[in-house]
Amino acid sequence: MIKKLLIGILCGAVILTVGILIGNYGITKSSSPEPSWFQDVAKDVDESFIEKFLAEVDNMQIQENLKELTKVPHMATSAGDEQTVQFMLERWQDPESGLDKAWREDYMVYLSFPDPKKPNKVTVVDPSDTVLHTVREKEKSYYPDQNHPDVVQPYAAYSPAGQAQGKLVFANQGKVSDYQELNKTLDLRGTIAITRYGGAGRAAKAINAAPFGVIGVLVYTDPLEMNDGLMSDANETYPHSWYLPPSGVERGSFNTHYGDMRTPYLAAKEETYRIPPEDITGLPPIPIQPIGFEDAYILICELGGEAAPSLWKGGFNCTYNLGGPGFRNTSPFNSSDVRLDIHNYEEVKKSGNVMGIIRGSVEPDRYVIYGNHRDSWVHGAIDPSSGTSVMLELTRVLGRMVKQGKWRPRRSMIFGSWGAEEFGLIGSAEYTEQYFTKLSERTIAYINVDIAVFANATLRASGMPSVQNVIFQAAKQVSAPGTSMSVYDNWIKYSNRTSPTQEVIPRIGYLTGAGSDYAPFVHYLGITSIDMSYTYDKTKTSARIYPAYHTAYDTFDYASRFIDPGFVSHQAVARTAGNILIRLADSLLVPFNCSDYSEVLNVYLKHAVNLYKTKLQAKEISMEPLEQAVANFEKAASHLEQVIRSSDLAKETPLKVRRINDQLMLLDRAFLNPLAFPDKYAFRHVIWASSSAGQPTFPGLADAFAKAELSGQPSDWAKVHYHLSVVSQAIDGAAYTLVDVI
Amino acid sequence: MIKKLLIGILCGAVILTVGILIGNYGITKSSSPEPSWFQDVAKDVDESFIEKFLAEVDNMQIQENLKELTKVPHMATSAGDEQTVQFMLERWQDPESGLDKAWREDYMVYLSFPDPKKPNKVTVVDPSDTVLHTVREKEKSYYPDQNHPDVVQPYAAYSPAGQAQGKLVFANQGKVSDYQELNKTLDLRGTIAITRYGGAGRAAKAINAAPFGVIGVLVYTDPLEMNDGLMSDANETYPHSWYLPPSGVERGSFNTHYGDMRTPYLAAKEETYRIPPEDITGLPPIPIQPIGFEDAYILICELGGEAAPSLWKGGFNCTYNLGGPGFRNTSPFNSSDVRLDIHNYEEVKKSGNVMGIIRGSVEPDRYVIYGNHRDSWVHGAIDPSSGTSVMLELTRVLGRMVKQGKWRPRRSMIFGSWGAEEFGLIGSAEYTEQYFTKLSERTIAYINVDIAVFANATLRASGMPSVQNVIFQAAKQVSAPGTSMSVYDNWIKYSNRTSPTQEVIPRIGYLTGAGSDYAPFVHYLGITSIDMSYTYDKTKTSARIYPAYHTAYDTFDYASRFIDPGFVSHQAVARTAGNILIRLADSLLVPFNCSDYSEVLNVYLKHAVNLYKTKLQAKEISMEPLEQAVANFEKAASHLEQVIRSSDLAKETPLKVRRINDQLMLLDRAFLNPLAFPDKYAFRHVIWASSSAGQPTFPGLADAFAKAELSGQPSDWAKVHYHLSVVSQAIDGAAYTLVDVI
């Protein structure tokens, strides 16, 4: 009995133990108080989702997008532009593959147009006022596209209207130094200068000219720079190749500052205060007009005077003379003037951005923004619709996943289809002005894909150094069209450098200019940004850009036959950019690398020390604060990386992960100083601001130093000291945000 | 057998079930995968901890602190200042009751001092250069404190050195309108103006004078404004009461802009670029010197000329004449001049902040900053050591809790003992310049307690409207000394208004000026701030401020006998401010109320509409964007409050709580515009900036409107439109951050 009792107790104990074990381990999951958000907050990027995404990006869809977008010309605020607004909205509001929400957002912006009823005229007139030659007003038509009634005729946006008549001179690229050179032997007062694109900004060619007394400017594309010297449309240029036909004219905005010019630092809403047009700075003070090289050839080859310096010579098979001023005695144009009759007018018009969002599941208050402008000059197949086609394919694939409930990003994604970029990044700039605080506080990164494919050789990417790593990671997972390599390995072949760890890596560029819509994000908001595209093999062409740029030949036909047959480079860009976008939105840890930022700051410092230190010492200006600041940054960056490495982020409190992510997200904001560049509109990032000194170092310091060396003025040396303090304190300020959280 | 078997199985099943139940419920806590941070992230403020804190705040400790801090004069950068630095460090580094960490942080700042070897002189000299009267150089001594060798003799910091001699005139308060009035009947060129404190800023009295040809200025404290008319030190003034003795002189900084004047927008480090002294704006262009009313009486009562307007008359028992210019014929000073010999000099000197922190446990990257300046003019018992004594008592109580492991705040606390405040808020301003980004990104609030106790009647508090609630909450939990009421109920008796819900509540003030160290936090960083103290019963005294302000009588004896015997008002301030500090640091939800902000914006809007709408309509300037923006803000604020009300925050994902807290923390940042007030140094908050228009509405709009109405210039009306856009877009921008997180 005792034995049985013992066995019973033993059995009971065993059963109880089994029960306890089952109770404790067997049903933990269902009965634990762990809340539903517990797994979500620790979730990292899903690599299998990225694979699925890459597989679904479809080159034929991109081609179809492009076909639709390029049906008609869609210059900002035109009827065609409105059609693309509707098309974007339709796609982003599609119940099967649209975004969570999409809407349009309008601004009233200051634009400039030619008068359709009074075309701009450039003529050669003899002393009796007889017109000897009239420059072509319209590009030659090879296909119906060029004949579309909405093709805007070539003009220089923001050139003042007016008539200018005088003797012609050839002023190379219209740089200050070019006019200075000409001015040595010629009296430029009352002359018309013909210049070629390149070397100086568009508006600068006229702004630089005016102080010398020049009263009108022409600008053309030299076949040497764009066409590798080729000129004949019988067999050499489009429609036979990608090269620019002789009558092709690059349109453009002739402005200096970006954003709506009448509402600086304010969103251009209906009732917003507008400065008077005469207070706008950075516009051409004299008429300027772009022309094709067909006409430039006729004008330049007839010029008299001395031969231009050899570096000024382009691709024409004649001597580039400077002008007597005017044409040579033996020319049929002898004694004749060139006359510009410009009828441009300015107007405040409604321009729309189309916005779309996918709301983040875990951190909806953190944004990854992806954008591209929508407006073109003519059909804009490459610029910008290649980028828009890519963006629409990204949003189709991601939107479908969201609609099917298969995926939702950790952070919010914002897509922007910007308006009026061609007139000066207006749509994106107004957006950043309107939502300044919200975007500054919450944006992880901005990705810009404007022209997605310049050519089909290799990837090209620019960005802050901190994003180098995530670009590389994405590029390694995408195969390069026409090769058996990854986009990454293919890229190294075209552009590379040796990293500090002796590894050969692709070279990424810096976003120091204002060439596309990344500018307001980088320079005004201080948001870590990326700009990317597929581009040329520079050993095979020296074209400044793809030759049909801003002309009536930038059409679907051109894109599909000469830029990217099969749209496989578009596909590679969509896959790479989309991969980056997903990683930025879904990674538990924001994939930014601070040490890569230190590396570049150290390179900049080294250059600055080499270039300036001795001379500054002589002025009793110490570079020690800058050296110390870069050292502080380096130490702080490696401290943060140590914190990251030593943390198991998936197990840490979500607030610790958020804390580190905030440090990474806000790093670029620390470099902003709204007072650093009073003469440069909305340039506030002291590391990446544009610079005219042409030195690979801190821009404010480089420009101030160049100016002081030239003038020798103590007040200019004081400004060098000032900029040294500005940049040192910005870098120190950034280091403070990294080194610890208190 | 079967029965036994069944019983056995049944028993086994019961035992198993019991086991499962034990396993599942009995030991859940130890075996659940719930991580250690899980409870922490959801923890709210602990009311029992606040009770403990309130109980431990000790008035006698505050008294001892004050005794120690006021042993010697401690003007910025003096030996006494250094002693207080060491004292703060010792206390904050105390192993039993110190903070986690404390350190000093130095700046090289531009200060102004009198020359101890060549005292400033003010004399009456007759035409033969005989000195008829010499103004007292030193305040009369009643106790050894006034005789301490480190007492700085009365001077106007930043007054230029130099001699000025001329006929005396009485210029009331030195406002522009005062000089205009005088100028109607007198030629002011070459005169010396005597002015009384009040009405205009210190520097303004000289800046306003110079354009009229005035060459020197005196300033005194009229007994009517400070002493309720009392003048005799035989029985009326200190040491018999709190009133200013006849020889007492208010020292001060005669500057217009705050922060180190030679390093605008940069931290004043050793090698920082410094603007040349001659480029500093806002300093007196002519010598100025403060004097006691004992001497002012002698000078003013001897003046000739017409009687001053009745509003100019002060407390002297003589006629306030304007001056002939100069003294009346019957005066012993007849034909005499007044001569100023000012020997002030400027020097860049090292000034220290003492910083201390308690690291937050859950969100160390969120800061609640509590600060007070350390430097005085003389012994500074009230200004600022009353505040420092309170701060030290707070840190003693909190530090001890931390050292004993009993408590650690959720968020980090930063304590700042600022240097060189008296010279223009220099220590705090440099701190905000040095750590601009870090502080902007992470600071929940700044609490300033400078003069803790002006008088012992009632609490006084100013701040952004969003903090009204937490101030009230804290004030309700503290008992008002000398009453049976709470600080809150006592406060209502002295200053109240009817809230929109018809409840009578205390009236809080706005931080629109730059009177203490809150200014760089409010105006430069846009950080939600609070400034508080105990203050007067205004029905019992009309003193402009406590009478010993900035004199050699502001001593421990004065404070303990006349301002707060027993230090119970100090204790009430310490309890209230500490309670707020703990709530801001420990509350799960940041205790800010957006609707209180809307209420004030609506009040401001109503005033603006009443004052300006009709006149602006006539100028075709619409106020609709402003009306719309305030409506947008109101809607967004109530949306956020709806989100808060409908969430059980302790159960939500910590990232959602953080998200809402970020919206609340960053709200004031949305109102910043670095370009809104180009003439006002470091004023960037478009709602709370200082204004000279004297209207309870948006300051930029009010000032621009006043100017335009005066000048009638179209360019001034354009600026009104500009400010309307600035303020509308700032309010819209703030609304965007509240309405949703994407």
Image: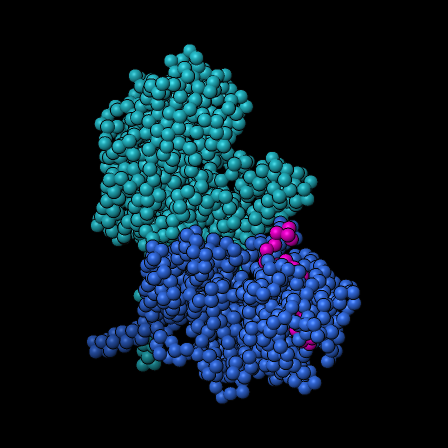
Chain colours: A blue, B cyan
Residue plotted at (57% across, 41% down): B704
Q: Is residue A266 visible?
A: yes
- x, y percent for residue A133: 75, 71
Query: In the shown orientation, is residue B427 left or right of residue B735?
Result: left
Q: Of B393 and B719, which appears nearest the observer?
A: B719
Residue plotted at (44% across, 72% down): A468
- x, y percent for residue B310: 50, 19
User: Image quarter for residue A589?
Assistant: bottom left
Residue plotted at (36% across, 49% down): B268
Query: In the shown orientation, is residue A618 left or right of residue A131?
Result: left
- x, y percent for residue A504: 40, 80
User: Image quarter for residue A706?
Assistant: bottom left
Extreme residue in the bottom direction: A484
User: Image quarter for residue A64?
Assistant: bottom right
Residue plotted at (38% across, 49% down): B274
Extreme residue in the top direction: B330
- For the C terminus of chain B, the quadrant is bottom right
Q: Does the magenta-highlighted stretch encompass residue A38?
A: no
Query: In the shown orientation, is residue B712 left or right of residue B148?
Result: right
Query: In the shown orientation, is residue B474 left or right of residue B671?
Result: left
Numbered disc total: 0
Q: Of A425 and A55, which appears nearest the observer?
A: A425
Q: Does the magenta-highlighted stretch encompass residue A298?
A: yes
Residue B716 lies, with reference to residue A131, above or below; the image says above
- x, y percent for residue B677: 51, 45
Q: Is residue A741 visible?
A: no
Residue A496 lies, with reference to residue B177, above or below; the image says below
Query: Magenta stretch?
Result: A276-300
- For the N terminus of chain B, the quadrant is bottom left
Q: Of A519 and B98, which appears nearest the observer?
A: A519
